Amino acid sequence: MSKNTGSSKFRKVNVDEFDENNYQDEVVEETQEGPDEGEVSNFLNSGKNLDALKHVLANPPVGNDKALKEKSAALALRVLSVFKPSEVEKGVKELSSDEVDTLMKYIYKGFETPSDKTCGILLTWHEKAYAVGGVGSILRVLTDRKFV
């Protein structure tokens, strides 16, 4: 038998806060505008493809504005399609771990609405991003609640 059966410390834990039905998603208070299309166009026109890619990946839209997210995904796809296949590996190796994860988010967003032209480009980028980020990058993207 237990010696201290009169203890009531266990009753001070609020078990209702651990209930799945009471779970609430994180509330994102700050909203970002996403990447600046004019600045990205300037980078692309001057041949600075890597700078354009880094700018798109540094400013992903946060919040629930679906139109902004679609616009940002289209801009990211435009930047990815500018790269030549021989430049993709070099471009991915220049990215940080967080940027590779954001790149994977945009790649999977592009896979949601496939077209003949973009599928090959996205598969090339996915192959190179997987080589740099590994399975961990894919898992972080698939389990992250903040979609682009």
Image: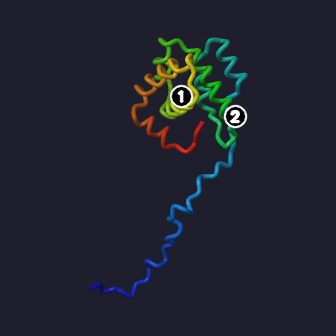
Quadrant occupied by the N terminus: bottom left
Decide which of 105, 29 is in the foreground and name it.
105
Which residue in the structure is indicated by mark 2?
68
The numbered mark at residue 86 is none
Could you tell me residue 33's position as x and y percent? 70, 35
Decide which of 123, 93 is in the foreground and name it.
123
Image side of residue 8 versus residue 39, left or right: left
Could you tell me residue 115's position as x and y percent? 57, 21
Image side of residue 41 versus residue 90, left or right: right
Which residue in the structure is indicated by mark 1?
111
**Amino acid, disc 2:** Leu
Mark 1 nearby-residue class (10 Å; few <14, some 14–19, many ≥20): some
Q: Is mark 2 on a helix, strand or loop?
A: helix
Residue 48 lies, with reference to residue 72, above or below; the image says: above
Residue 54 placement: quadrant: top right
Residue 7 lies, with reference to residue 118, above or below; the image says: below
**Amino acid, disc 1:** Phe
Image side of residue 100 versus residue 42, left or right: left
The answer to whether mark 1 and mark 2 are in CB contact below 8 A is no
The answer to which of marks 1 and 2 sits earlier in the sequence is 2
Q: Is mark 1 on a helix, strand or loop?
A: helix
The structure residue drawn at horizontal position 57% and vertical position 42%, both measured from the top left corner, is 146
The structure residue drawn at horizontal position 46% and vertical position 26%, both measured from the top left corner, is 129
Residue mark closest to the camera, 1 vs 2: 1
